[in-house]
Image (cartoon, rainbow, N blue to C red):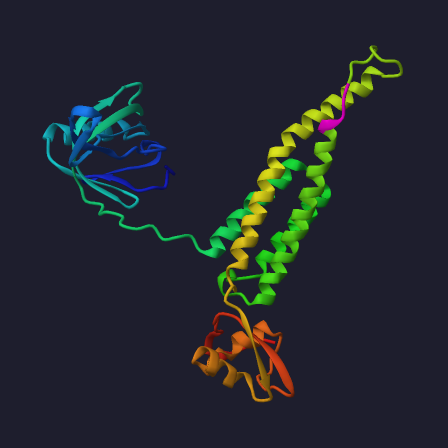
Amino acid sequence: MKPDTILQLGDFEFSGTEIPERIPFGGEQRLVVHKLVGGKRNLQAMGADPMPISWSGLFFGATARDRARYVKTLMDSGKALDLIWDEFFYRVVIREFRADFERFYQLPYQITLEVVEDKSGAVLAIAAPSVDDLVRKDAASITSLADSIGDPTLSSLVSSLNSAISKVSDIAKAATSTINSILKPINAVRAQVQVLFASVNNTLRSVTTLGGILPNNPISRNVGRILNQATAATQIPILQQMDVTLGRMGKNLGSINSGTKTVTQAGGNLYRVAANEYGDPMGWTSLAAANGRTDPQLTGVNTIVVPPLNQTPNGVLNA
């Protein structure tokens, strides 16, 4: 837990070194287990039993002794207190408080709280990560893996990939042409990964013999080969992980405009196409972006790419 986290027990607010790096929480489900003939089991859930909340810290400074004694007073009272940190909110009673007097300004302590009630509220659902989150997380992983490989060409290609991603503010709403601008460097990185994978495989397949056993086989040369093989052995799982991650990125990006179709239009304008396809003429900006146009007017016969509707606010399209 970061020192700037608010941690409050009743009317007492911990601060600085008094705040621990972590506060464990949780508990167990109380169960009644009936063991039946034939090995069958019948379980009855009796309800959650929260575990005591414990942590340790250090009272430090001119008021350290008084602050420790005040927490002891809270324990002596035996009253239920509110415990609050981050988004956690418990009603607790101090079961145990211990402080070691080292100096009047320095008292390490330990505290254990018995939970009366968890008032934090249940988390009933977890929102699925967005395409943007998935792609950017995978990109960060690819960068880290490439750094551990140390191949200049690979690092340069990964840098180009990150640059392409950084130019897109909202990947989930990007037009097909924009998605392709990310897919292209992904494919380039993946191709280099395959090149390196083949190279390290060749290195591992090369046979090394001890110098001196065979004629014209210097020890230094064999040592170099052994070192190369050791390096190659460590790179294989990294390259495999990169390939899997790059494949996942491509799949996630490919799913964005999977509903794209085309229509053939003779003359007219993109307003009418948007009205027919989206039920909203203001969707013309999505059509324009997908087809590399800034003018809604159409001349001649055109094949219009129709991606899923991704509107630009107020129908304004930047050239």
The rendered magenta stretch, by its main secondary structure, is classed as loop
| Foreground pick, 76 / 61 | 76
Give whichever of 246, 24 is nearer the camera.
246
Asked whether the viewer can see residue 212, the reply is yes
In this rendering, the count of numbered labels is: 0
Looking at the picture, tell me which residue is in the foreground, 248 or 142.
248
The image quarter in which residue 25 lies: top left
Residue 134 lies in the magenta stretch: no
Is residue 207 on the magenta stretch? yes
Q: Residue at x 25, y 22 (%)?
A: 99
Tell me if residue 151 can be seen.
Answer: no
x and y, in percent, of residue 51 in the image: 22, 31
Q: Residue 9 in the image: x percent, y percent?
A: 21, 38
Instruction: Please give the range of residues in magenta.
Output: 204-208
Q: What residue is drawn where x is 81% and y is 15%?
A: 219
Q: In the picture, residue 82 is in which quadrant? A: top left
Q: Specify the quadrant that holds the C terminus.
A: bottom right
Q: Quadrant of the N terminus?
A: top left
The spot of residue 121 in percent (x, y) is 22, 47
The residue sitting at 28% across, 23% down in the picture is 104
